[in-house]
Image (cartoon, helix red, strand yellow):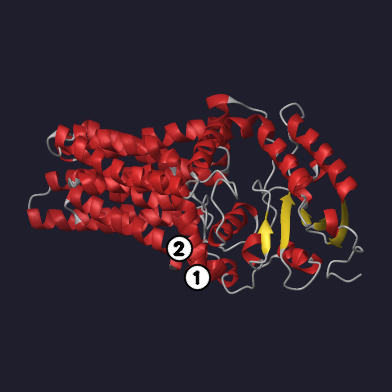
Amino acid sequence: MILLLVRGRPITYSDTGIFLTVAQEILNGGRLYVDVIDNKDPLFYYSQAVALATGGWRGPFLADALWLTIAGASSFVLVRLLTRRMSLAFFALLLYPLLLTGIHFFAGMSETPGLALVPLFAFLMFAPRPVLAGLTAAAILLLKLNLAPVVALIVVAALVSGRGPWRTLLWRSAAGFAGLYVAALLLLGIRGEFGGYLSSLQANRDYASDVLPVVYGRSGISGHLAVIREQTPTILMILALGGIVLAGLLIGLAPAVRRHTASLSLLAGAAWIGCLGVLSLTAVWGHHLELLALPITLTWVLVAWCVALVLDERAQEGESSRTVSAVAVGLIGACVILNGIFLAPPSSDNFHAWADAPYHPVADALLAARPAADSDVTYAHLGQNDEFSMGAFLPSSFHLVCPHIQQYPWSRQPELDETLNCLATKVPDLLAVTPLFDPSRQWYSPDPEASRPWRAFYERARLWIDGHCTPRVTDSRVTVFACGASKGSAARGPNGAG
């Protein structure tokens, strides 16, 4: 909780704003991927909805305290299992949550929940408790499907390490996985969300390759690797590469170390290959690099264990050996943890932000533009992730009618066409248009060729607005238009005044 309060911040704009709007639509009875569309995985959104219902708008952000607790506790039991050393287990308990909340951490984002469960899954595979491991793997993929390669490689590492008859481990873990995953798909089908979920999977598959050329003018694996290089701070790069080199030297030069650390070495290698594999295909934004916390943690635990084993081997007395080893682990741990803190220093601004009132200008403008108090209103949004959690701060009398609540320069033509068709056929009472709808208001320069469909969409949407809507509320953050039968009212200022 302390890490979350000083290194996280609850914000109602950007992606986390979209998450709050989607979660509220679920609570209002809307169908995920059908009545409101975003490309995140189903368990993530349903957990967001539960957190929003129980904790208000701060709930989904505060839920990260639970995920970070799970991350630390599962790292502890995993390292305790593999090393039998309490000092190393406490090192992992501190380091993993610290790195998860590092420079790439944003409270309420979708990476943290899945990453929190990965050490628990590894523990259950190496314990071995394969059925529970399979259930945990299904939960991870329902939270963050991108972690599938990491999960698969951890299974391989557990099988290679000889943690039990491989056939038994494999089929029992597969049975646990299939049981939960199939049950989740059935629930999506019952709710009428399964078809939309399949479309979401396709959108996720294409997302990174669509964004790269528009935002960065790059493509392919080399483009993703360039993002990793540019958005990884030097100190984090040193932590990663330094840990790999030290672990390699210690294991290579000390045969006794190699024998004892085989399982942890396999696990760390699987984490590196899996995480770098995922990032080389998907890395676009800085928060994607939160994945690096997992292999860096395992690598430095491995380094500390190697040092402890070398000291044990050279010591004359077993008891003094343990003392020296514990001191060495403590020193290594302190250095790495201090570097982790330096990556994202605790901020009093973050702490005070938890007490601030939420900022929701789009919802305020929609409420001001409502034709009559407490009347049922249909609404839609044109813009990007600049809608400031509008759905989370609107009463249930507001009904979202166009499910694509964000349109980007990399959005594909069918999605943009669906949005225009929805406006034309359902004609919302109110249309919120936020600044990033305008191509001239972007924080970067979209590639002209790659963003051509979006620019054409903007022109067509402007024509439709000009012909069917009139402005009712204007503000620096939003313009709310009345459309269709509601368009006759006079325009209002930011506070709804005529």
Q: Is residue 293 visible?
A: no
Lateral position of residue 392 relative to residue 240, left or right: right
Residue depicted at 83% across the width and 70% down the height? 495
Q: Earlier in the sequence, mark 1 or mark 2?
A: 1
Mark linked to residue 448: none
Instruction: Give whichever of 395, 406 is nearer the camera.
Output: 395
Q: Quadrant of residue 178?
A: top left
Relative image position of residue 160 (x, y in whole percent): 20, 32
Q: Quadrant of residue 207?
A: top right
What residue did someone put label 2 on? 63
Residue depicted at 52% across the width and 49% down the height? 104
Q: Amino acid type of disc 1?
A: Gly
Relative image position of residue 354 (x, y in whole percent): 56, 70
Label 1: how many residues lie within 10 Å, few (<14), some (14-19) or many (20+)? some
Residue depicted at 7% across the width and 53% down the height? 317
What residue did someone put label 1 on? 55
Instruction: Give whichever of 296, 352 is nearer the camera.
Output: 352
Q: Amino acid type of disc 2?
A: Ala
**Quadrant assignment for the N terminus:** bottom left
